[in-house]
Structures are given as structure tokens and as C-alpha cells.
């Protein structure tokens, strides 16, 4: 008979959480990990060595800062075989290839080591691009959870395409042709995720996303970062196919449900975040336009210039996140190419390389969000009750933009015209609409309603909160010896 501590530990589930190592996947899985820890689950969070280095660099090189922010979460790394100079956002396909070749071996050894250290792994929550994980989990007799980091609408679209339930169109068909998928509004070609649009044949994201579905049946659970109230019909329509259980929106708790007031930031940033809160504090309520294109988007210099000129002409204060690698041109520092604009707008705006986005979205001075519509940014805007203008770039952003404008009605989407650009006049006009028109008041009202529903889903006994509890109960029920 072991000590009381040992007996407790045997009963405590040990969940390994393994995101695909990019910011937009690390964030929701880290927030999920925090929700598990709050419920007395032991969590090991896996990153690659490269990501670990970047996290430490972003914290001024102090490893202790990184670990102390998550004192209850254990971090482990696996090898990705990337050289220190490999630029993080440049090649997702290459990262995946390396993880498939090198990561797979170190991952299996890591799980065996964790098991041999006395705290047996009870479940592996994995990110679908890492589709070899359920195979290893099954081999080691550990249940696994497929964690979908995009919307349920996109889950359903991808599933239907993967199963051949929707025919792929050829390039000659009209982009306005309607695609019917049960539970979803009518979509035209341009509303589909970019990798499924006929004009993008050969998009490397297509095999990557489709492969994620090849092993879904090996996973014990499918979890998704969304909430029932937001995508009720979409979830229900998947119930008879491969049901997905909602556990979101996974944003820092302090800004939404308040269950964990200490959780004020995701805690993992791959770029050093500038504290722009002091600057925001000096601005009047709801006057600032926040602009960000997430962690991966790459824009042409022309597009950046059109946005800059539209912002300037709007005369609104703006806070713009321009990552050093936001533009396409090699060896061209985007901040240098905007030198004149930056000088001319010194009293109007602040440009930073990265910021604590949820704190910004929840700052009273921020009146709207100009976004690329990545799924995290979309959920974060809804959770913060902020209206948006979208300039989608690729992947699921096109579908998210459609939902923002036509289903949730919290924003305006801008389409690329002419040379494939959104022009300065459209940027200026959309800002005016959201910030100053009657339509803007309506968008804000809708956004605030979604904030209320998002909170309701995450507070005690809300739909997502209960789903997290069920998930843990089921993991415990499968543990040996219970
Ligand atoms: N983000 C941030 N600071 C920034 C810009 C983005 O913390 O300056 C976070 C944002 O809150 C979100 C994530 O980075 O959680 C970006 O994910 P999203 O799905 O929106 O876009 P992606 O980067 O995957 O295209």
C-alpha cells in the first residue's frame, strides 16, 4: 500500500497536450491545458525545442520567466531538428515534415519516459496535423483526443470534402456557385477555406488538412475550440457523423468567465510583446482601431501601403501590429518601408511588432478590430464584444469572414479587387462604418450579445464548462485501477 500522496497521484489523471508548434495552435491548447490544471489534472505540455527557444527569447532570454508563468504545467520538448536560424513562420510544410520524421521518434520515447516516471499518461490531446499521434497512443494503450483548432463549420466542410460528400469543382466553374452542406448556410466557392477553392489547386494546405482526417477514427474524443450557442446547427449536423464536443472559447479566463482571475494572458508568445496599455490608457473610450493579421499572414508591400493610407485617412487613432516578417519581400524590413507613414502618423497611431492581444481587445479605448480573421482572433473578438472589419488572407479565414458578416453579424468583410488588393478607400470607409454609423452601432450590439453567450458557455455549468468536466470524467473512467 503506497502513501496517501501516491494514492492521490494514481487517481489524478495525467493528460499530455501536444499542439502543432505555431502560435495559433499553441494558444488554444495552452488555455485548454490551464482549464485541465484548474480541475486537478496533471498536465504535460509539449513543444518543440525551437519553440521553447523562441518562448525564452521573447521573455528576454530568461527561462525561469517562462516556467514560472505556468507553475502547475510541466513542459517537455521534442526534437524538430531545426537550426536556430530557421524562421518560425516561413514554412509550415517543412515543420510538419520534420516533425513527422524526427518528432515522431522522440515523442514516443518521451511518453515512455513519462510513464516510467510513475505518473502514467492517461490521455494525449493532440493537434490534428500531427496525425501519427493516435497511432502511438494506441500502441501504448493510451486514449487520445483530436483537438480541432478551427470552427465547427470548417470542421464540417473539411469532413464533407474528405469523405467525397461534396464534389471538388474545377477551375472553370463560377465562384458564385452554391455549395450545400447540411447544417451550414449556403456557401459559394469563395466562402470555402482557401485550400478548397478551385482557383487554388495545388495549395499545400490541402493535403495537410485532409490528412488530419485520415486518423480521426482512431481518436477516442473529438474536441473543438468553439461553443454550442455560436454554431449550434453546425454541431448538431455533425452528431450523426463524427461528433465534436465544444470546449471554448479558449481565451484567458480573466477576460471572459473569470473562473481563474490570474489567467490574464496565454503566456506563450513567440515574439516579444510590447506593453501598449499605457498608450491605450491615454485614449478616449472606444476610439482606437486595433489592427492585426495574426502570426502567419504575409502581405505584399502594396497591401500594407493601402492599409496604412486608409488608416491615416480615417483620422482615428490606431494600434497596428506589424510583425517584422509581415511582408513578402525578402531582406526588406517592413518598418523601413513605412518610414514616411510612421513619421506622419506619430500622433495618430502606435505600431508594434507584437502585443498582448486579449488585453488590447478588452481595453475600453479600443473600438474595433481590423483582422485577418484567423479562428483565434475571430473568437477573441466575439468574446470581447468587439465589431470587426475583416481582410481574410487564406486558410479558414475566408469562411470565418463569411460567418462574421452574414451569420453572426458583427462585422464587415472587405474583398480583394483589381490587383488582388483591398484599397485604401475601402479601408477608410469600413472604419467609418464601424466607428461612426448606425450600422456600426448594430454591429457592436450584436458583438456584445455574443460576448454574453461566450461567457455563459465557459462559466460554471455552461455548455463548454460541462463538456470539459465530462471529458475529464471519461478520462478518469478509463484509467486503470478505477
Ligand atoms: N496574437 C497576440 N499578439 C499579437 C497578434 C496576435 O497575442 O500581436 C495572438 C492572438 O491573440 C491569437 C493568435 O496570436 O490568439 C493568432 O491566432 P489566429 O488564429 O488569430 O491567427 P494565425 O496566427 O493562426 O493566423
Image: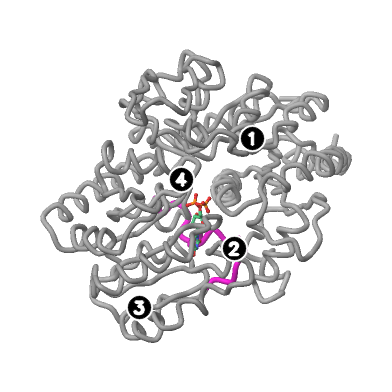
Pointers 4 and 3 in contact (C-beta within 8 Å): no
Residue 59 rendering spot, x and y as whole percentages: 65, 72
Query: In this orientation, does residue 114 appear?
Result: no
Image quarter for residue 363? bottom left
Q: What label does residue 411 carry, if any?
A: none
Report whether 101 appears left or right of 442. Answer: right
> Gap between marks 2 and 4, in whole Å?
17 Å
- Of labels 2 and 3, the one closer to you: 3
**For this rendering, which residue is in front, 353 or 360?**
353
> Is the residue marked 2 within 8 Å of ligand 1, measured from its CB?
yes
Please say if 50 is above or below 116.
Answer: below
Whichever of callouts 3 and 1 sits on the residue coming sooner in the sequence is: 1
Whichever of callouts 2 and 3 sits on the residue coming sooner in the sequence is: 2
Please say if 304 is above or below 192.
Answer: below
**For this rendering, which residue is in front, 416 or 346?**
416
Pointers 2 and 4 in contact (C-beta within 8 Å): no
Which residue is pictured at 67% across the width and 59% down the height? 88
Q: According to the image, label 4 marks what residue?
A: 375
Q: According to the image, label 2 marks what residue?
A: 269
Around disc 4, counting alpha carbons within 10 Å, would you say few (fewer than 14), some (14 to 19), or many (20 or more)? many
Q: In terms of secondary structure, where does tag 4 sit?
A: helix
Around disc 3, counting alpha carbons within 10 Å, would you say few (fewer than 14), some (14 to 19), or many (20 or more)? many
Whichever of callouts 2 and 4 sits on the residue coming sooner in the sequence is: 2
Q: What label does residue 208 carry, if any?
A: 1
Report whether 374 appears left or right of 118. Answer: left
Q: Is most of the magenta stretch helix, strand or loop?
A: loop
> Is the residue marked 4 within 8 Å of ligand 1, measured from its CB?
yes
- Of labels 1 and 2, the one closer to you: 1
Residues in magenta, as a range: 257-273
Q: According to the image, label 3 marks what residue?
A: 349
Q: Per the image, is 267 magenta?
A: yes
Amino acid at each position: 500500500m503506497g502513501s496517501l500522496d501516491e494514492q492521490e497521484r494514481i487517481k489524478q489523471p495525467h493528460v499530455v497536450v501536444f499542439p502543432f508548434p505555431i502560435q495559433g495552435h499553441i494558444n488554444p491548447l495552452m488555455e485548454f491545458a490551464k482549464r485541465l490544471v484548474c480541475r486537478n489534472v496533471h498536465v504535460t505540455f509539449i513543444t518543440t525545442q525551437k519553440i521553447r527557444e523562441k518562448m525564452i527569447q521573447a521573455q528576454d532570454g530568461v527561462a525561469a520567466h517562462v516556467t514560472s508563468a505556468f507553475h502547475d504545467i510541466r513542459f517537455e520538448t521534442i526534437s524538430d531538428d531545426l537550426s536556430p536560424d530557421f524562421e518560425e513562420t516561413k514554412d509550415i510544410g517543412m515543420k510538419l515534415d520534420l516533425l513527422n520524421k524526427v518528432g515522431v521518434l522522440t515523442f514516443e520515447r518521451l511518453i515512455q519516459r513519462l510513464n516510467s516516471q510513475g505518473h502514467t499518461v492517461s490521455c494525449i490531446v493532440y493537434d490534428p496535423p500531427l496525425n501519427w499521434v493516435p497511432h502511438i497512443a494506441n500502441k501504448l494503450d493510451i486514449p487520445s483526443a483530436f483537438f480541432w483548432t478551427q470552427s465547427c463549420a470548417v470542421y464540417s466542410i473539411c469532413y464533407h470534402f474528405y469523405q467525397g460528400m461534396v464534389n471538388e469543382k474545377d477551375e472553370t466553374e463560377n465562384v458564385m456557385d452554391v455549395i450545400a452542406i447540411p447544417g451550414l448556410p449556403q456557401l459559394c466557392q469563395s466562402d470555402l477555406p482557401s485550400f478548397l477553392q478551385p482557383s487554388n489547386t495545388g495549395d499545400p494546405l490541402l493535403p495537410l488538412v485532409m490528412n488530419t482526417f485520415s486518423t480521426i477514427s482512431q481518436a477516442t474524443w473529438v474536441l473543438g475550440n468553439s461553443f454550442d450557442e455560436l454554431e449550434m446547427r453546425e454541431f448538431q449536423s455533425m452528431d450523426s457523423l463524427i461528433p465534436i464536443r465544444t470546449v471554448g472559447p479558449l481565451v484567458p479566463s480573466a477576460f471572459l468567465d473569470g473562473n481563474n482571475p490570474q489567467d490574464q494572458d496565454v503566456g506563450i508568445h513567440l515574439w516579444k510583446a510590447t506593453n501598449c496599455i499605457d498608450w491605450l490608457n491615454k485614449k478616449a473610450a472606444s476610439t482606437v482601431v486595433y489592427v492585426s493579421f495574426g502570426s502567419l499572414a504575409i502581405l505584399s508591400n502594396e497591401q500594407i501601403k493601402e492599409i496604412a493610407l486608409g488608416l491615416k485617412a480615417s483620422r482615428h487613432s490606431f494600434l497596428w501590429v506589424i510583425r517584422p516578417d509581415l511582408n513578402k519581400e525578402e531582406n526588406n524590413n517592413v518598418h523601413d518601408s513605412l518610414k514616411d507613414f510612421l513619421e506622419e502618423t506619430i500622433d495618430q497611431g502606435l505600431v508594434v511588432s507584437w502585443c498582448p492581444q486579449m488585453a488590447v481587445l478588452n481595453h475600453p479605448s479600443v473600438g474595433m478590430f481590423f483582422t485577418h480573421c484567423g479562428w483565434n482572433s475571430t473568437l477573441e473578438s466575439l468574446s470581447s464584444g468587439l465589431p470587426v472589419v475583416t481582410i481574410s488572407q487564406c486558410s479558414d479565414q475566408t469562411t470565418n469572414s463569411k460567418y462574421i458578416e452574414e451569420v453572426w453579424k458583427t462585422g464587415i468583410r472587405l474583398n480583394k479587387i483589381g490587383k488582388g488588393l483591398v484599397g485604401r478607400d475601402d479601408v477608410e470607409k469600413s472604419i467609418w462604418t464601424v466607428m461612426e454609423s448606425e450600422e456600426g452601432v448594430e454591429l457592436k450590439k450584436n458583438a456584445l450579445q455574443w460576448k454574453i453567450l461566450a461567457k455563459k458557455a465557459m462559466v460554471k455549468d455552461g455548455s463548454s464548462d460541462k463538456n470539459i468536466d465530462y471529458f475529464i470524467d471519461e478520462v478518469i473512467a478509463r484509467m486503470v485501477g478505477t
